[in-house]
């Protein structure tokens, strides 16, 4: 008779997107076996060898970060986090699943791109992972391949209205991919910025001698994000396909999403912590320090933050992901000294998301359940992982975080675990901290010590979007 590995988490406040309940949780091997209200006879009947006392703590589902870029090639360099370092940092921050982006090279196949990303990730991840597919080259062969990828659990495809000559797709290519997704159940994810117009503004700014990092934000205008968002929505409407707009940063873009949703369209929006907590003030920091904050879509003036928070409260924005794509300041961000257009685009954040969103609870922007909804449950549903991921329920994977809502910490490059030489939130004091993390029942963070291992994390095939109306 085989013996089961049983863990019992007692006396915590269990928070999901739907409920808050003082309950005990029994984990058997990799899954949640039972939940019983604390102090009841059902709870007292639960037994296990491994006991975790969560008195005074929250017990929450592991975070699902639906937007990361580990080891991503960009602008002649690579994102500084590998799948090993990046997933370890994610675990430290209470995230137990990432969905990263495999990249199709122009002229290459989707299969070649996906195989290359499988090779990078396999055996290296501390937590579970899935893939989206960046479609850089829409042609008849690519469209057929999209069907095959959906069948094997890669069910979302990202296109770019930005970066001409690299990832850019024109409206015709976007429409064809959307039409294919309408047929195969895939979800099109869109980087919505008018890259053709932005390139004109970049050229003109550099010609005027405007080379500092702050001009990165000035040329990537909010109106050009809104215009591209509107265009993507209408193309998706023509194709009869759902649309997920990534890293929404501007008031005007949120308004486009809200209008589409009011019309009953299956249009969804994601924002990121950097747009909620940082601004063009950071991009304008002197002595090239602003380069640390160069990402696309860019940081906006502070007044845009209110619209993003409101969008998260009204569900016009459904998900907060990180777009984690770190580049070291020394040697990588510095490639753009004297020319902001050469600064690698991306910020570190996979370790900070759950904590920053808890701070938003403390600050009164969102409720505790909404925190779990936008960081765990909805990304799991959006990307076909629910209820295996994103909730605490019998049968779900035992991806569980013991979270101390009272602990204080100061975010800093000195103490974070991401493989990057700066923190975008350096010196920020926040309330709340991850204490213990289980991934499929295995302790990966144990009372603030890393006890996981590279290779524990498994590739997780996904079903199609479970969030459609």
Image (spheres, helix red, strand yellow):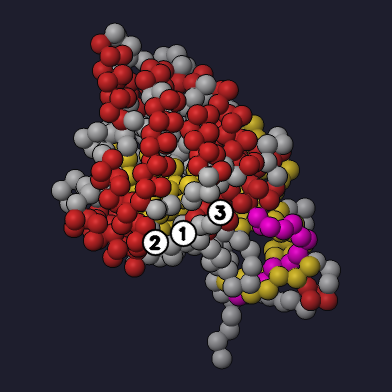
Kindly give the residue lying farthest to the bottom in the view shown: 1
Above or below, 70 against 201 in this view is below
Q: Residues within 10 Å of mark 1 (few under 14, many from 20)?
A: many
Q: Residues within 10 Å of mark 2 (few under 14, many from 20)?
A: some
Q: Position of residue 406 (x, y in %)?
A: 73, 43
Q: Which residues are magenta?
A: 16-28
Pointer 2: what residue? 185
Pointer 1: what residue? 465
Question: Between disc 3 and disc 1, whose residue precedes?
Answer: 3
- For residue 457, the mark is none
Which residue lies at the image location 53% right of the left edge and 29% below the top edge? 251
Query: In front here: 358 or 309?
Result: 309
Whether the residues at callouts 1 and 2 have beta carbons within 8 Å, the answer is: yes
Q: Check disc 2 and report its element: helix, strand or loop.
A: loop
Pointer 3: what residue? 378
Q: Check disc 3 and report its element: helix, strand or loop.
A: helix
Whether the residues at callouts 2 and 3 have beta carbons within 8 Å, the answer is: no
Q: Position of residue 410 (x, y in %)?
A: 61, 33
In magenta stretch: residue 458 = no
The CA distance from mark 1 to mark 2 is 8 Å
Question: Between disc 1 and disc 2, whose residue precedes?
Answer: 2
Query: In front here: 319 or 287?
Result: 319
* Left or right side of 219 for 280: right
Above or below, 23 against 210 in this view is below
The CA distance from mark 2 to mark 3 is 18 Å
């Amino acid at each position: 008779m085989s013996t089961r590995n049983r863990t019992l988490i007692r006396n915590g406040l269990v928070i999901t997107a739907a409920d808050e309940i003082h309950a005990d949780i029994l984990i058997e091997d990799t899954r949640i076996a039972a939940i019983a209200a604390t102090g009841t006879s059902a709870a007292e009947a639960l037994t296990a060898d491994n006991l975790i006392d969560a008195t005074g703590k929250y017990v929450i589902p592991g975070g699902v970060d639906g937007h990361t870029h580990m080891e991503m090639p960009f602008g002649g360099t690579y994102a500084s986090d590998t799948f090993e370092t990046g997933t370890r940092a994610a675990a430290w921050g209470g995230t137990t699943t990432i969905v990263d982006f495999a990249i199709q090279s122009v002229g290459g196949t989707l299969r070649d791109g996906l195989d290359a990303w499988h090779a990078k990730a396999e055996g290296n991840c501390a937590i579970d992972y899935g893939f989206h597919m960046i479609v850089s080259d829409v042609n008849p062969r690519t469209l057929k391949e999209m069907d095959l990828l959906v069948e094997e659990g890669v069910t979302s495809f990202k296109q770019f209205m930005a970066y001409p000559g690299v990832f850019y797709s024109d409206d015709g290519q976007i429409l064809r991919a959307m039409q294919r997704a309408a047929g195969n159940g895939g979800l099109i994810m869109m980087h919505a910025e008018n890259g053709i117009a932005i390139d004109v503004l970049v050229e003109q700014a550099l010609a005027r001698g405007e080379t500092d990092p702050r001009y990165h934000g000035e040329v990537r205008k909010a109106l050009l994000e809104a215009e591209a968002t509107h265009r993507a929505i209408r193309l998706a409407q023509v194709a009869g396909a759902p649309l997920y707009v990534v890293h929404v940063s501007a008031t005007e873009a949120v308004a486009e999403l809200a209008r589409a949703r009011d019309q009953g369209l299956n249009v969804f929006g994601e924002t990121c912590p950097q747009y909620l907590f940082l601004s063009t003030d950071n991009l304008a920091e002197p002595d090239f320090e602003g380069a640390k904050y160069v990402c696309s879509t860019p940081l906006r003036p502070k007044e845009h933050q209110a619209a993003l928070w409101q969008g998260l409260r009204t569900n016009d924005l459904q998900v907060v992901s990180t777009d984690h794509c770190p580049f070291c300041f020394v040697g990588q961000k510095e490639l753009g000294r004297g020319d902001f257009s050469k600064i690698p685009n991306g910020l570190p954040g996979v370790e900070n998301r759950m904590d920053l969103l808890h701070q938003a609870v403390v600050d009164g922007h969102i409720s505790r359940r909404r925190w779990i909804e936008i960081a765990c449950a909805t990304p799991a549903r959006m990307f076909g992982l629910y209820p295996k991921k994103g909730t605490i329920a019998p049968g779900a994977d035992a991806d569980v975080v013991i979270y101390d809502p009272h602990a204080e910490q100061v975010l800093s490059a000195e103490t974070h675990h991401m493989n990057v030489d700066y923190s975008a939130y350096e010196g920020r004091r926040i309330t709340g901290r991850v204490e213990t993390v289980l991934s499929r029942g295995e302790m990966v963070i144990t009372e603030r010590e890393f006890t996981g291992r590279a290779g524990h994390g498994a590739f997780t095939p996904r079903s199609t979007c479970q969030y459609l109306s």
